[in-house]
Amino acid sequence: MTTASGTALRGRVVTEHGELPGGLVVVDADTVVWVGAVADAPPELAAMPDAAPPDSTILPGLIDLHCHGGGGESFPDAPGPEQARTAAREHLAHGTTTLVASLVTAPRERLVEQTALLATLVADGDLAGIHVEGPFLAPARCGAQSAEHMVAGDPALVTALADAADGGLIGVTVAPEVPGVLDGVLAAVVAEGAVPSFGHTDASAPQVARAVEEARRLLAGGPRGRRPVATHVFNGMRPLHHRDPGPIPVLLTAARRGEVVVELIADGVHLTSEVIRMVFDLVGAQGIALVTDAMAGAGMPDGFYLLGPARVQVTDGVSRLVRGGAIAGGTSHLLDVVRTTVAAGVPLAEAVHAASSTPAQVLGRGDVGSLAAGRRADLVVVDEELRPRRVMRAGAWVA
């Protein structure tokens, strides 16, 4: 990276408040110092040379709360820090300046070992934290995960993972109906400074409503966001039926009320454009976190990859289990997900909000998530088709 001090970028600027045509972003060292219309800028700022190519749009750096890998490497399978860094850098190069690494269900010893490995990347700043997807999940909704390693709720395992993460544990996905989750695991997750997330669940609507209420009560005094999360809503949970509603309507209506953040894998594979648009219309960007659920094949050619213990084949950009054919994570970068969301009919500012500001709130981070004075200088310069041109993280251009 090369340090960019006193850098000015002009173009269409997307802020938390909407799109700003003819906008200007000024960075000094690692901080955004001014955002606004060029016409309103102080003369000394308006006169600065432009570091953005013509016809550019400047977005805040994107934040992915749910990512299993990329660039040919998998966070659950990385044998060492360098392989994990390869995955993180794959997404950074495409505009994800704040990345959470996700693990999948595995034996206890393996989960603790991989959490400790990823903690070194959190300490170095390559990762924003660690999300553990399992093992307190419903085998009936295991998806691409290993049902044989799913277990009853165990607060001691949560503590062991938090110890291994050394302050870096930010989320744990659980199924509310699994024994021990409501009466032990939720409290342990929040006590360790993480956010509970509900997914891979076959729970009834009342079970999910009770879990949301309990998680909100516990999070009221926590260091992260005050809202629990729904892990990739629709995917990995009991489908919606008008006489057996299951988790989906509870989670969506709670998100509309500002009580839950729902993850959407809006990549055009996991969800159709109609569903993506419906959730934005119903919930609003303030209640949605766009995620990739990306695995090792993100940014890579079609071929065979690993996702935990599972062997996965990517064909035409779609990742599926070799055995069984279930969709097994995604192959997109978060900017691809933003582009697909916009193509589904969602306004750009709303899609970007769901890929930056809302996930920043989940993390409890006030230094990232929007283009505003005083924030860390994380931004993505894109072309008219929302393809990346340049990426800046903490005031440094990413090579």
Image: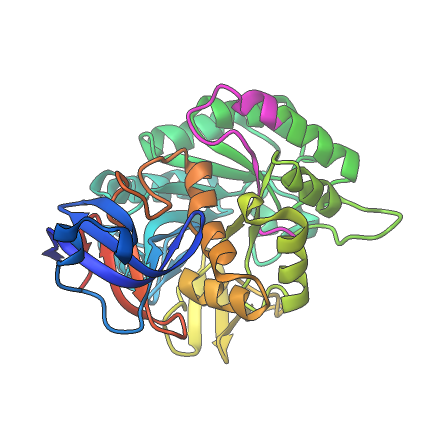
Main secondary structure found in the magenta portion: loop
Q: Is residue 178 above or below residue 220?
A: below
> x, y (%) of residue 33?
21, 43
Q: Is residue 293 visible?
A: no
In the displayed orientation, state which residue is furthest to the right: 243
Q: Quadrant of residue 279?
A: bottom right
Residue 110 falls within the magenta-colored stretch: no
Q: Nearer the viewer, residue 376 or 316?
A: 376
The residue range painted magenta reads: 215-235
State left or right for residue 4 relative to residue 304. Answer: left
Q: Is residue 299 visible?
A: yes
Q: Quadrant of residue 281?
A: bottom right
Q: Residue at x 17, y 64 (%)?
A: 50
Image quadrant containing the C terminus: bottom left
State left or right for residue 45 relative to residue 327. Answer: left
State left or right for residue 323 relative to residue 375. Answer: right
Q: Residue at x 64, y 22 (%)?
A: 183
Number of marks in picture:
0
Q: Is residue 178 above or below residue 307?
A: above
